[in-house]
Amino acid sequence: MVTTEKSPLKGKSVLVVDDEPDVLDTVADLLEMCDVTTAADFDTALNYLLNQTFDIVILDIMGVNGFELLEKSVLRGFETIMLTAHAVTPDALKKSIKLGASAFIPKEYMKEIEDVLENILLGRGTQLWWRKNLGQDSNYFEKEFGQGWKEKDAFFKEFEKSIEDKR
């Protein structure tokens, strides 16, 4: 997505938490229209979450206690996105949804973060990420988790239905 002067991200305050410096740098570059704060560890991130205000928080899961930070972020009312590489599993997706994440994005698709954040800020809210095309992969989660992965857990069917009912 090409950012214009009218982008809903322009000037937004974003906290990015990841233990990999290259990920912090990449996300900051992708969100250059925002006021980006970065944290490379749990304690620094927690301090920011408790003492500052953010429009959006982007969390890694592994290496920074991302689920605990997710709980704190959601309690503060921040739109929170999970951006992960090693925790791309149905259980991690389920836990992220239950704890209130607005999105769950595999790191290999971090280049799409601007589009995801704009959709959230425009009020499109939580999306069914297993339906969204990621890059050229129209069935990313089917490929990653296996055919029929949603049917193995009633939670995903119920969640999908609740989203559909809101539309």
Image (spheres, rainbow, N blue to C red):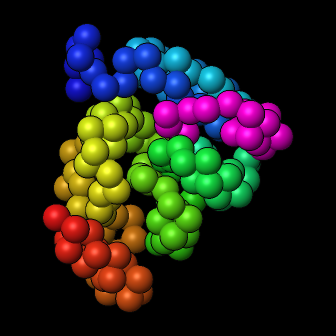
Q: Where is residue 62 in the image (x, y as percent from the top left)?
A: 67, 52
Classify residue 99 by image quadrant.
bottom right
Q: Position of residue 36 (x, y in %)?
A: 56, 21
Q: Which residue does the image show at 31% across and 26% down from the upper left?
A: 8
Left or right placement of residue 91 versus residue 132 in this view: right
Looking at this view, name the residue that lies furthest to the right. 43
Q: Position of residue 12 (x, y in %)?
A: 45, 23
Q: Which residue does the image show at 73% across and 53% down from the upper left?
A: 65
**Tag count:** 0
Q: Nearer the viewer, residue 50 or 161?
A: 50
Question: Eyeballing the image, is 163 above or below 64?
Answer: below
Q: Which residue does the image show at 23% across and 17% down from the upper left?
A: 6
Q: Nearer the viewer, residue 113 or 57?
A: 57
Q: Is residue 6 magenta?
A: no
Question: Eyeballing the image, is 26 above or below 49?
Answer: above
Task: Answer whether residue 102 is visible to the viewer in this image.
Answer: yes
Task: Answer whether residue 62 is visible to the viewer in this image.
Answer: no
Q: Which residue does the image show at 26% across and 69% down from the upper left?
A: 163
Quarter of the picture holding the N terminus: top left
Left or right placement of residue 99 versus residue 38 in this view: left
Quarter of the picture holding the C terminus: bottom left
Left or right placement of residue 23 versus residue 165 in this view: right
Looking at this view, name the residue that lies furthest to the top. 5
Classify residue 75 by image quadrant.
bottom right
Residues in magenta, as a range: 41-57
Q: Does the magenta stretch include residue 55?
A: yes
Left or right placement of residue 116 versus residue 133 in this view: right
